[in-house]
Image: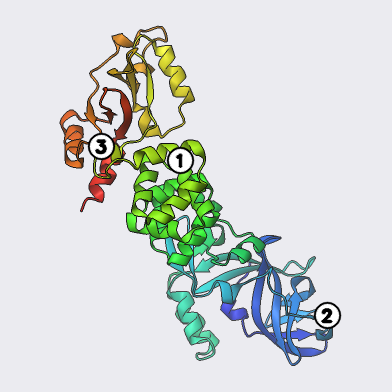
Amino acid sequence: MPTLALTELLGATVYDPTGAAGRVREVTLAPQEDRNRIAAFIVKTKTGNRLVPCASVSAINGGIRTSTISAEWQAANATEGLFLLERDLLDQQVIDVNGRKVVRVNDVDLEFDTNAAARPMLRVVSVDVGARGAIRRLLRGMAPKAALHALLGKIPPRSIPWKFVDVIETDPARRVKLKISHDGLAKLHPADIADIVEDLAPAEREAVFETLDEGVAAEALEELDPKVQVSVVESLDSDRAADIVEEMDPDAAADLLEKLPEDRSGQILKEMEPEERNEVSQLLQFHERTAGGRMSTEFVSVPDNGKVIDAIEALKQFEGSREAVATVYLYSVSYKVTGAVPLVKIAISTPSTPLTDLREDAVTCPSDTPDDEVAGLFDKYNLVTLGVVDEHDRLAGIITSDDVITMLRHAD
């Protein structure tokens, strides 16, 4: 199908049945109806800006020709439900969810169906983020069309399919009206989302976290640089921030809240559900750079007189992080830690196998163990998880290897 650049349409003459009637000022989408199909043109006429729906366009060839006269075109006063391609897309940053990066739009590629049996249908197919779009706009109206086309033909295209583009809208009201979400972004790995978010301006970061699902937002938030983490949470309303923090691992949530001003962390805690609030509040009592401050209170443990089937049932009911299931801890009738069983042993054993037959010594440390000693234990014993015990040798929480990696990455 023929393609056309947005910048070739902008300024094009619009002809009604009586002759030249105006020039294209904007090209619009109505995302709530169709994210791809052009909905209307805003045309500058002698009587002001007018809205010309695509249903009134009879041809796009050397200009735009309509089947209705300009007197019938309604005034373009209300554009709240429309996405304007020049205003809202050109020179704007968008998210390339396929390339996992933030890019700037230089032009927009449109495709139109000239099927004689129907009126022309114009669709957005991609955005130009390379030199071609920039040069086309720079030289538009300054160089002969033939010379410009010859020059552009020598420059490789660099475009992103429209289906891979997530538009950033910072105005909450417009996000709702235009139904702008970040479904494509939400499908990426949390670490990739974090990398993208860190390349955005503060207002754009807030816009992304306002529209992401709470679970996805929580995982992405955990991957952000601590300073960016704080900036994002401080920009959100307390109830929205609480919804996201509730979905975070308790240790990560506690680390984040500890970095916030006391009144702000207090507001967020107040909005959280009681169970999650209590877990995080307990962790906030520990010094940040100790085992207690690093640990998560979500772990898998079963009585040491149980069998593999008991461990399997506990794993089925566990709702914590996937890293935490690497080790099942055993405890006595007095709840003291008596050993640990790696997940792999449970996986290859019969359900009736006593857990004592699979037990290994549990490597643990007190809650006040400093960070460097925690890292040393992981290194010395090649640990996947480290148990953190209270003064009675009862399991208070665990530290996982990814916690240690994060700790080392952000060490001063």
Find residue 301 and report its image quarter: top left
Q: Is residue 311 visible?
A: yes
Helix, strand or loop at mark 3: helix
Residue at numbered disc 3: 291
Residue drawn at 20 percent across, 30 percent down: 382
- Mark 2 → mark 3, Cα distance in angstroms: 74 Å
Between circles 1 and 3, the one closer to the viewer is 1
- Mark 2 → mark 1, Cα distance in angstroms: 63 Å
Say which mark, if any, is on residue 48. none
Tell me the amino acid under the disc marked 1: Arg
User: Residue 292 placed where, x, y %?
Assistant: 28, 37
Quadrant in the picture for the N terminus = bottom right
User: Residue 370 placed where, x, y %?
Assistant: 19, 40
Which of the two discs, 2 and 1, labels the residue nearer the N terminus?
2
Residue at numbered disc 2: 68
User: Residue 70 placed where, x, y %?
Assistant: 80, 85
How packed mark 3 is, by other alpha carbons closer than 10 Å (few <14, some 14-19, many 20 or more), is many
Find residue 365 and report its image quarter: top left
Dot 2 and dot 1 residues touching (CB under 8 Å): no
Between circles 2 and 1, the one closer to the viewer is 1
Residue drawn at 54 percent across, 90 percent down: 141
Residue at numbered disc 1: 277
User: Residue 138 placed where, x, y %?
Assistant: 47, 84
How packed mark 1 is, by other alpha carbons closer than 10 Å (few <14, some 14-19, many 20 or more), is many
